[in-house]
Image: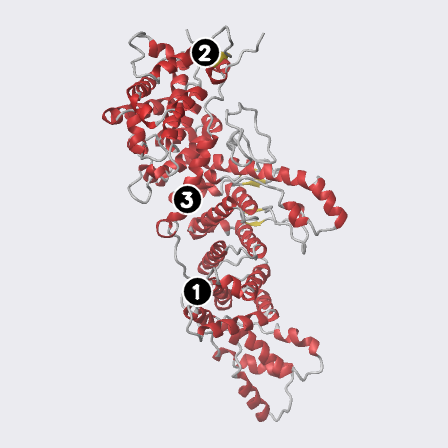
């Protein structure tokens, strides 16, 4: 006997003696796809339809198979089906509601496939008709809102959210989806917040709710007043904000965990063995095999929360046990489609601190730490377009954080120390840092570490100029806060200085190639001004006087780079080319470094070059500890010569030189440059609108592609709704 086949709605294949046998629901669909009213011959047609298990594949395929004219001929029946689906959402029997929700999803997706090139108005007309659109959509949104807020079936809530995601992503550009006008008018914002504030609902539906909110916030956000933006910006309920933060943290933590698992698997696999045999020459190629798909949707949700809601900043620092170390309670796994790594919703939500008390033996974490770890992964490789966009979004989020006064307060708080294990790109010239050796430090140290790591590891032909500019801006904004509040951060500043100088060296070495694509002088000016910030205001935020010594040592050790940079910008600023003005700005910015620091080196070298013990050179140099105006300029020479003549000394000792220097030090001042401790605040609408439009478009396509509505088996539904009479 032939095996029963249900594909395409067939219960068995056709043969010479028997006609193909179709499911009853398929036969009923066929009636809808005629020009006749299916309820004429069967008044109970619509009641019976929603008791039948939905055949999504057949219904969507049937719609897709029709051309435009054929679809218009059955428009009345499509409108009727859509309206009866909405009516069925108010039924007492959950099976009818489930089937109505799945049918609505199939209708929306199927009609969308036929209207890709047309406007949203055509989709509205085809689904519900212009004359009834306002009332029908109002009823639909009210029914969905009621289902989401009710204490009923979790399966129904899941389908409601998936229907809403389907509705939102029906077009690639959600701002062209005029169906969303009805979602704006009939808000479901409070229903989303209720899901996020409830531990049970959050665990089951938090991911979909957060992604849905992020997409709704981006509907025509630059063209009109979006009520979801307004409402999100004023949310102050602690439980709701913490719930949203927990969903985001869990999703990012799951991504980090999966990446770490793949990394460990990779290190113990074939490539690891190969590397051990032949050395490190293949390490870069081997690590390219660790491919992780980014999760821009959850990043977008984090960005909108940080950018729009000042109250959410407090959520970033909410401590909870390290998610990778804790054992969460068993809970039902939400039914979700199988998607690539990093895009799936977490299997279970992290539970609240009340449900899981902090253990002194367990490393604590928070959303910011989880986000920094995530950023350290996605920012490793910016060659892929999606990872480039993710890296940019991570830096935008950090920019918003670096500008916030309260965020800076807990970033620099000495009483909030954490051990943050950032992922570092494998490089031939350095060893992998051991996790156990990481110190507990204020969180701002991890942010600076991330910036230094990016600067060091992305000097390449496909130079990510935009990301470098954002990195330097973040560092500058953190320094501005430290200078303003006189925060003396105990950080390994030398690593930052070295990275910045090497960046300048890279820009000069690749001047011709980079100038063909980028204005490298903008970046060079920002780097030089960072050094000016340290030289001019360092006494207000560097931890110790010896930190100044390290700064000058680093500049002196690499002084040839500053000389070369000066020569390059001087050459271009004296020519009447397109780079004259930006190069001139760098020339002026180099004044302090060249005259105060490098000039200091040359001067001291001149006065002690005849001494018999040249090993004491740097000891003499670093014995100079004074106030902010540390610059020694070459006009000291006449003072020393005058001192020698008055005292009839032919050759001065080190102590005598230092005595002259100290006695005349107060007469020296740095050339103060305006605006070193000021910056332009981040503005999305004016500078980032194009980026976010493209990002949301990509997210919309990805969400629509990964939505699944048929994951609920009829058996599970019947078991859940076993009380149906």
Residue 110 x/y as whole percent: 39, 26
Residue at the image point whose x is 44% and y is 9% from the top: 723
Which quadrant of the rendered structure holds the C terminus? top left
Label 2 element class: strand
Label 1 element class: loop
Earlier in the chain: of badge 1 and badge 2, it is: 2
Residue 150, visible in the rendered structure:
no
Q: Nearer the viewer, mark 1 or mark 3?
A: 3
Q: Is residue 177 depicted above or below 466 in this figure?
A: above
Instruction: Give the colouring mode of the picture.
Output: secondary structure
Packing grade of label 2 (10 A; few <14, some 14-19, many >=20) is: some
Q: Which numbered marker is on residue 676? A: 1
Earlier in the chain: of badge 1 and badge 3, it is: 1
Q: Depth check: give the residue in front, 46 or 537.
A: 46
Which quadrant of the rendered structure holds the N terminus? top right
Asked which quadrant contains residue 639, the reply is bottom right
Q: Which residue is mark 2?
A: 22
Residue 406 x/y as whole percent: 43, 49
Q: Which residue is mark 3?
A: 694
Packing grade of label 3 (10 A; few <14, some 14-19, many >=20) is: some
Q: Nearer the viewer, mark 3 or mark 2?
A: 2
Q: Residue furthest left?
A: 131
Packing grade of label 1 (10 A; few <14, some 14-19, many >=20) is: some
Earlier in the chain: of badge 3 and badge 2, it is: 2
Q: Residue furthest front?
A: 16
Residue 697, visible in the rendered structure:
yes
């Amino acid at each position: 006997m032939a095996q029963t086949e249900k594909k395409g709605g067939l219960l068995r294949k056709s043969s010479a003696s028997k006609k193909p046998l179709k499911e009853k629901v398929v036969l009923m669909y066929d009636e809808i796809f005629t020009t006749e009213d299916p309820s004429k011959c069967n008044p109970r047609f619509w009641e019976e339809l929603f008791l039948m298990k939905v055949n999504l594949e057949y219904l969507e395929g049937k719609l897709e198979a029709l051309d435009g004219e054929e679809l218009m001929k059955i428009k009345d029946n499509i409108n009727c089906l859509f309206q009866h689906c909405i009516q069925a959402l108010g039924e007492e029997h959950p099976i009818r509601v489930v089937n109505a929700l799945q049918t609505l999803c199939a209708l929306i997706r199927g009609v969308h496939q036929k209207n890709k090139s047309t406007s949203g108005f055509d989709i509205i007309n085809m689904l519900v008709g212009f004359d009834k659109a306002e009332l029908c959509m109002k009823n639909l949104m009210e029914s969905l809102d009621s289902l989401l807020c009710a204490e009923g079936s979790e399966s129904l809530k899941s389908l409601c959210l998936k229907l809403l995601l389907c509705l939102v992503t029906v077009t690639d550009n959600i701002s062209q989806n005029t169906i969303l006008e009805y979602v704006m008018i009939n808000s479901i914002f409070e229903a989303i917040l209720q899901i996020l504030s409830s531990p049970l609902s959050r665990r089951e539906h938090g991911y979909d709710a957060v992604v849905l909110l992020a997409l709704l916030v981006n509907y025509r956000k630059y063209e009109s007043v979006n009520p979801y933006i307004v409402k999100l910006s004023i949310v102050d309920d602690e439980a709701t904000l913490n719930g949203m933060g927990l969903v985001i943290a869990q999703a990012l933590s799951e991504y980090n965990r999966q990446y770490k698992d793949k990394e460990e698997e990779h290190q113990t696999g074939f490539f690891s063995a190969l590397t051990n045999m032949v050395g490190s020459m293949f390490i870069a190629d081997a690590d390219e095999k660790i491919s992780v798909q980014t999760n821009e949707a959850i990043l977008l949700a984090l960005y909108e929360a940080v950018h729009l809601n000042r109250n959410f900043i407090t959520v970033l620092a909410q401590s909870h046990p390290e998610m990778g170390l804790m054992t969460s309670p068993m809970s039902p796994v939400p039914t979700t489609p199988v998607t690539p790594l990093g895009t799936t919703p977490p299997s279970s939500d992290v539970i609240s601190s009340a449900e899981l008390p902090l253990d002194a033996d367990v490393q604590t974490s928070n959303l910011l730490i989880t986000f920094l770890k995530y950023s350290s992964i996605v920012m490793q490789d910016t060659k892929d377009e999606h990872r480039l966009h993710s890296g940019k979004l991570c830096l935008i989020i950090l920019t918003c954080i670096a500008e916030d006064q309260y965020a800076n307060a807990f970033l620099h708080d000495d009483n909030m120390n954490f051990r943050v294990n950032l992922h570092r790109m494998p490089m031939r010239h350095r060893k992998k840092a051991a996790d156990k050796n990481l110190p507990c430090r204020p969180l701002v140290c991890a942010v600076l570490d991330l910036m230094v790591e990016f600067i060091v590891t992305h000097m390449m032909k496909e130079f990510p100029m935009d990301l470098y500019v954002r990195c330097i801006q973040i560092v500058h904004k953190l320094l501005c806060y430290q200078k303003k509040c006189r925060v003396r951060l105990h950080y390994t500043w030398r690593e930052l200085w070295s990275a910045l100088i090497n960046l300048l060296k890279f820009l000069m070495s690749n001047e011709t190639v980079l100038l063909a694509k980028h204005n490298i002088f903008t970046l060079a000016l920002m780097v030089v001004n960072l050094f000016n910030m340290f030289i001019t205001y360092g006494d207000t935020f560097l931890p110790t006087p010896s930190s100044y010594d390290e700064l000058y040592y680093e500049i002196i050790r690499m002084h040839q780079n500053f000389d070369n940079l000066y020569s390059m910008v001087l050459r271009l600023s004296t020519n009447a080319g397109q780079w004259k003005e930006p190069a001139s700005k760098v020339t002026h910015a180099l004044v302090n470094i060249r005259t105060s620091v490098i000039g200091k080196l040359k001067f001291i070298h001149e006065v002690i070059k005849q001494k018999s013990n040249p090993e004491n050179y740097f000891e003499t140099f670093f014995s100079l500890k004074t106030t902010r105006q540390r610059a020694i300029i070459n006009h000291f020479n006449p003072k020393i010569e005058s001192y020698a003549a008055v005292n009839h000394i032919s050759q001065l000792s080190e102590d005598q030189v230092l005595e002259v220097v100290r006695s005349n030090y107060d007469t020296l001042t740095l050339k103060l440059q305006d605006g070193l401790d000021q910056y332009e605040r981040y503005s999305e609408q004016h500078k980032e609108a194009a980026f976010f439009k493209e990002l949301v478009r990509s997210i919309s396509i990805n969400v629509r592609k990964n939505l699944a509505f048929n994951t609920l088996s009829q058996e599970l539904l019947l078991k859940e709704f076993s009380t149906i009479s």
